[in-house]
Every structure is written in structure tokens, then in C-alpha cells.
Amino acid sequence: MQVCPDCGRFYDDSIFASCPFCEGILGDGEPGDLDDPDWEFVYDEENNPVACPSCGAPDLRYYDGMGRCVECGMSFTDEDIEDEVGPWSHF
């Protein structure tokens, strides 16, 4: 994990060579980006927001069969999320 010195957001430096937020790779308003309203929040079975298994940020989102953290940009499969929190939903 790397903290961008410009924007202060976490990103996975094993996936991205530079900050994907500053570079416009994540969150630039294109369909499928994390700013897209189709990304739904992920909740556990008690309707509590699910934190990112990687960085702990409370911004795990779900869209088109994939979970992704708003802060670090890590992606998670349905199975990854279930292994971390047990039964879950998104809305």
C-alpha cells in the first residue's frame, strides 16, 4: 500500500505505478468508476457497512459482480467478501 503525497489517498502500488486517483484511473466520473452512482455500499447481515479487508476503510462498494474499496482501490470477489464478513448484501 502507498499513500499518495498529493491527494493523501491509499492505493495499491503493486497494481498502480502512480496514484490512480490523481491520474484519473479511479474516480474520474466515467461509467464503472467508483464515483458512478451504480456502485452500491456493501453491508453485513446486520446492515453494518463492510470495511475494506485490505486497508480497513469503511468504503467497500459493489458493482457488476465485483467489490472495490474507494480508498485503496483493491478489488474483491464475492467469495473474498464472504470469507471476510460472512453473509452480506449490497444496496
Image: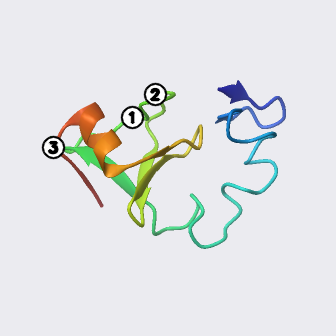
Mark 1 to mark 2 CA distance (whole Å)? 5 Å
Instruction: Compare residues 21 and 84 and report the one nearer the observer.
Output: 84
Mark 1 to mark 3 CA distance (whole Å)? 13 Å
Tell me the tag on residue 45: 3
> Quick check: 46 left or right of 74?
left
Residue at 19% of width from left, 37% of height from top?
Answer: 86
Mark 3 to mark 2 CA distance (whole Å)? 18 Å
The answer to whether residue 45 is seen in the rendering is: yes
- Name which of mark 3 and mark 2 comes first in the sequence: 3
Residue at 42% of width from left, 56% of height from top?
Answer: 66
Q: Tell me which amino acid carries mark 2.
A: Gly
Instruction: Compare residues 2 and 17 and report the one nearer the observer.
Output: 17
Residue 21 x/y as whole percent: 73, 48
Above or below — where is 63 with respect to 41?
A: below
> Quick check: 21 left or right of 80?
right
The secondary structure type at the circle numbered 3 is: loop
Residue 11 x/y as whole percent: 66, 36
Q: Residue 7, located in which quarter of the rendered image?
A: top right
Residues marked 1 and 2 touching at CB (< 8 Å)? yes
The secondary structure type at the circle numbered 2 is: loop
Residue at 72% of width from left, 27% of height from top?
Answer: 3
- For the view shown, which residue lies furthest in the bottom direction? 31
User: Would you call the spot at circle 2 few (<14 residues within 10 Å), some (14-19), or many (20 or more)?
Assistant: few
Tell me the tag on residue 51: 1
Residues marked 3 and 2 touching at CB (< 8 Å)? no
- Name which of mark 1 and mark 2 comes first in the sequence: 1
Q: Tell me which amino acid carries mark 3.
A: Glu
| Residue with the mark numbered 2 | 56
Q: Quadrant of the N terminus?
A: top right
Q: In which quarter of the image is the C terminus?
A: bottom left
- Name which of mark 1 and mark 3 comes first in the sequence: 3
